Amino acid sequence: MSPTQHPPLPPNIRPALSSDIPRLGLLFVASFHYSPNTKWYRPYYPRFPEDMLAQYTAWSINYLEDPQYITLVATDAFDPSERSKTEAHFPAGVTTCLGEDVKEGDQVPVAIGIWKVGIERGREWREAGGKVLEGAQLPPKPETRMRDRDQGHCDAMLGIEKAARERCGFSRLVELDMLVTHPAYWGRKHGTKLVRWGLEYSRMNKVGQGVVGPPMGMRVYLKEGFVEKEKMTWNGDEITPEGLAKQIAVYDLD
């Protein structure tokens, strides 16, 4: 494999820091509240919001400590009223997950992009643009009780997704694993900027890219050049009557 090339980071995009961890968990919850994916395999999350926050906080720590991932955040001027602009459920006492000295207009993380690039490419990133994590101490992972999940839904979803990924050749692709934006900062192109950085990474390194997601998010990817390969559906039931639909798309350089 040739040495990995890294596109320059656009303004207001930077590598995620260990100090961002509490904020990353909050961003996931604030955004995923609106995802049909969450309604399908976390149907009990409104009753156990602490479990969803703990799970995504733990995942954020995993992403930063695992060398096969590149994790970037987009920053924007802090809006003190952001809590009122998401209908997401949070545990009592959880507000912005920012320091007490953060004030209106300060630049804070508002969106996250995570790419699974493989260990070799990921290590090259950490030796280059990701050096900010060198020597950083990550916080301990919170307990993840997962009372918000329906395990049957989760197993059904992951099993079908795994087979579809294999059919679409994800093992040879970079995968856009996560992309979320806090609802208070929607409409400002943060997600688009992150997607475009990832596609430039693919073009520079001559490696295709795959993504899996529900239709509400897939529109962004298709607009930027991904091509739909498969659709997946799960029938509704007494737990989640509306069921679930997801798509797999690939950005192919051939």
Image (tube, rainbow, N blue to C red):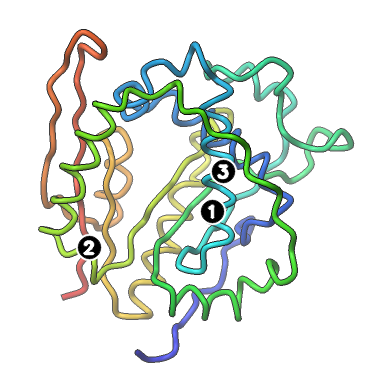
Few, some or many C-alpha atoms within 10 Å of disc 2 (few <14, some 14-19, many ≥20)? some
Question: Who's the residue at 23% across and 56% down the image?
Answer: 226
Asked if residue 14 is positioned above or below residue 31 in the image, the reply reads: below
| Disc 3 to disc 2, C-alpha distance | 24 Å
Q: Which residue in the protein does label 2 denote?
A: 170
- Of the 4 image quadrants, the one containing the N terminus is bottom left
Q: In this view, does 147 lie to the left or right of 72?
A: left
Mark 3 or 2, closer to the camera: 3
Q: Which residue in the protein does label 3 denote?
A: 58
Q: Which residue in the protein does label 1 denote?
A: 62
Identify which amino acid the numbered label 3 is placed on. Answer: Ala
Identify which amino acid the numbered label 2 is placed on. Answer: Phe
Identify which amino acid the numbered label 1 is placed on. Answer: Asn
Where residue 146 appears, as percent x and y from the top left, is 46, 28
| Disc 1 to disc 2, C-alpha distance | 21 Å
Mark 1 and mark 3 in contact (Cβ < 8 Å)? yes
Few, some or many C-alpha atoms within 10 Å of disc 1 (few <14, some 14-19, many ≥20)? some
Q: Nearer the viewer, residue 94 or 8?
A: 94
